[in-house]
C-alpha cells in the first residue's frame, strides 16, 4: 500500500515548503535627488489642487442668507 498525498489545486503552494532559494535579490537603488524632488513636487501639486478646489467651491456650498431674506420678504408682501 502506498500513501498518496491528496491533490492540491496549486501544486507550487504545496511544494513551497521544500524549495528554499539561496539567491538574494540585489539591493534596491537609492532614489536620486531629482526623483525625490519630483515626488515632493507632485505631492505638493496634488495637495494644492485639492485645497484650491475646496477654496473655490466653498462659496457655492455656503448658504446665501441675503437671497433667502429677499425671497421671504417678497413672499410675505404678496399676501
Image (cartoon, grey):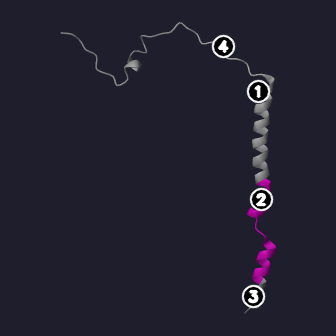
- Spot occupied by residue 42 in the image (x, y as percentages of width and height): 76, 37
Q: Hey, which quadrant is residue 1 in on the image?
A: top left
Image position of 62 with respect to 1: above or below? below
Magenta segment includes 70: yes
Label 2's element? helix
Relative to 57, residue 71 above or below:
below
As rendered, which of 16 and 29 lies closer to the eye? 29
Residue 59 placed where, x, y %? 79, 62
Of residue 31 and residue 20, the one placed in the foreground of this image is: 31
Q: CA distance from mark 1 to mark 3?
A: 65 Å
- Would residue 16 be found to the left or right of residue 29 on screen? left
Density class for disc 3 (Cα within 10 Å; few <14, some 14-19, many ≥20) is: few
- Nearer the viewer's eye, disc 4 or disc 2? 4
Label 2 or label 3, whichever comes before in sequence order: 2
* Marks 2/3: CA–CA distance: 30 Å
Q: Which residue is mark 3?
A: 76
Circle 2 residues within 10 Å: few <14, some 14–19, many ≥20: few
Q: CA distance from mark 4 to mark 2?
A: 48 Å
Q: Which residues are magenta?
A: 54-72
Q: Are marks 2 and 3 in contact (CB under 8 Å)?
A: no
Residue sticking out furthest to the top: 22
Q: Which residue is mark 1?
A: 35
Q: Name the one closer to the observer, 18 or 34.
A: 34
**Residue of label 4:** 27
Is tag 2's residue or tag 1's residue first in the polypeptide sequence? Answer: 1
Amino acid at each position: 500500500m502506498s500513501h498518496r498525498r491528496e491533490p492540491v489545486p496549486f501544486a507550487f503552494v504545496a511544494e513551497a515548503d521544500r524549495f528554499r532559494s539561496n539567491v538574494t535579490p540585489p539591493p534596491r537603488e537609492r532614489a536620486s535627488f531629482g526623483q525625490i524632488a519630483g515626488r515632493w513636487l507632485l505631492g505638493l501639486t496634488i495637495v494644492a489642487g485639492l485645497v484650491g478646489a475646496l477654496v473655490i467651491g466653498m462659496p457655492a456650498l455656503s448658504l446665501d442668507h441675503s437671497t433667502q431674506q429677499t425671497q421671504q420678504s417678497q413672499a410675505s408682501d404678496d399676501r
